[in-house]
Amino acid sequence: MEGENQTTVAEFVFLALTLQPRQEALLFLFLFLVYLATMGGNLGMTLLLRFEPRLHTPMYLFLSHLSFGDACPSSPVAPKTLRDIFAETKSISFVGCAAQMWVFGLFVATECFLLAAMACDRYSAVCKPLLYTLVMSQRVRVRLVLGPYAIALVSTMTHTTFTFSLPFCGPNIINHFFCDISPLLSLACVDTWVNKSVLFVLAGVIGAVSGLIIMASYACILGAIVKIQNARRRWKAVSTCSSHLAAVSILYGTLIYVRPGSSSSLGTNKGISLFYTVVIPMLNPIIYSLRNTEVEDAFWRRVQRKQFLRGG
């Protein structure tokens, strides 16, 4: 009888990021430009690394998947957020909310382990340069690429299934701009202790394992760099890792700030969430192409080739 009296939620409603018309226009312009840069930068980087033979190395293989992974989580969040800025009712269907959370969670978790795989690649390049091609064989590269997707798929399917198996009987207002787990759990009609425990454990395992792999790799890299006597070789080793280290610092610093159970205010977490859902995916192509002569040369070769074909 109790289940019959409950009203099943068919859709969820987001709260506005801002209620000021002027701020809405500026926010729309900012998010629109950032989204264009994100998609253009990441898809362009993915295609460049895919079709440029000189960039078919393990490092750029991981980078192509990282760029693809940066483009994907922005797609279910940014266009919906842009549309909702001027919409009176910022609603999303029950199934649409589940899909949004699943896609976003899948690629965020994948990125954590792809960064760990890239740290292993940098370790092999700096600490074992003579054995690099043997250590980073095709079989190893395939496993290091498929592994992050498989782990992220299991984790995200668990979160999505557990979350959307809960009864939502009202209210249906999510105090956020996209379907994140924590705000959704607060709307459930039952105790969500199990869900929060699973979230804490899985998020902790993903963050801890990938983080430990990265820290262990860089501890070995640092030890190897200190032993290098030649200043030019030492600088080359440092520059090899600088882009990856910058991307790791930005992502993990942001995720730690909005970790499950964080005591930060919801308004602050909204701002940080906006940063890692929209801004970070835009930054990675810039970080990895900045002062990277191989990527820059490949890009200009492609441009010159197109100009030559047009001229012919």
Image: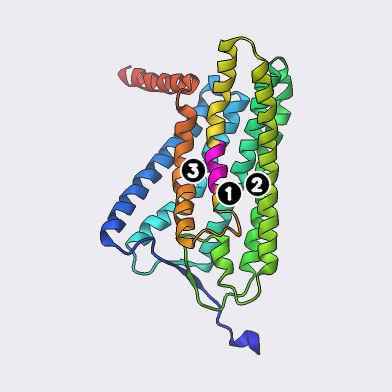
Mark 3 lies on residue: 71
Please state the horizontal and vertical placement of residue 130, each as a whole percent of the image: 71, 14
Q: Earlier in the sequence, mark 2 or mark 1?
A: 2
The span picked out in magenta is 248-254
Disc on res. 256: 1
Residue 305, quarter of picture: top left
Q: CA distance from mark 2 to mark 1?
A: 9 Å
Label 1 element class: helix
Residues at discs 3 and 2 in contact (Cβ within 8 Å)? no
Please tell me which residue is depicted at 47% across the width and 34% down the height of the picture. 285
Relative vertical location of residue 213 with respect to residue 154 in this rendering, above or below:
above
Mark 2 lies on residue: 207
Kindly report the secondary structure that dominates the magenta region of the rendered protein: helix
Q: Earlier in the sequence, mark 3 or mark 2?
A: 3
Residue furthest bottom in the image: 1
Please tell me which residue is depicted at 68% across the width and 29% down the height of the picture. 219
The colour scheme is: rainbow
Residue 98, quarter of picture: bottom right
> Label 2: how many residues lie within 10 Å, few (<14), some (14-19) or many (20+)?
some
Please state the horizontal and vertical placement of residue 39, each as a whole percent of the image: 43, 41
Please tell me which residue is depicted at 67% across the width and 41% down the height of the picture. 210
Residues at discs 2 and 1 in contact (Cβ within 8 Å)? yes
Label 3 element class: helix
Which of these two is toward me, 51 or 204? 204
Please tell me which residue is depicted at 64% across the width and 19% down the height of the picture. 225
- Evaluate whether residue 292 shows in this view: yes
For badge 3, the amino acid type reads Ala
Residues at discs 1 and 3 in contact (Cβ within 8 Å)? no
For badge 2, the amino acid type reads Gly
> Label 1: how many residues lie within 10 Å, few (<14), some (14-19) or many (20+)?
few
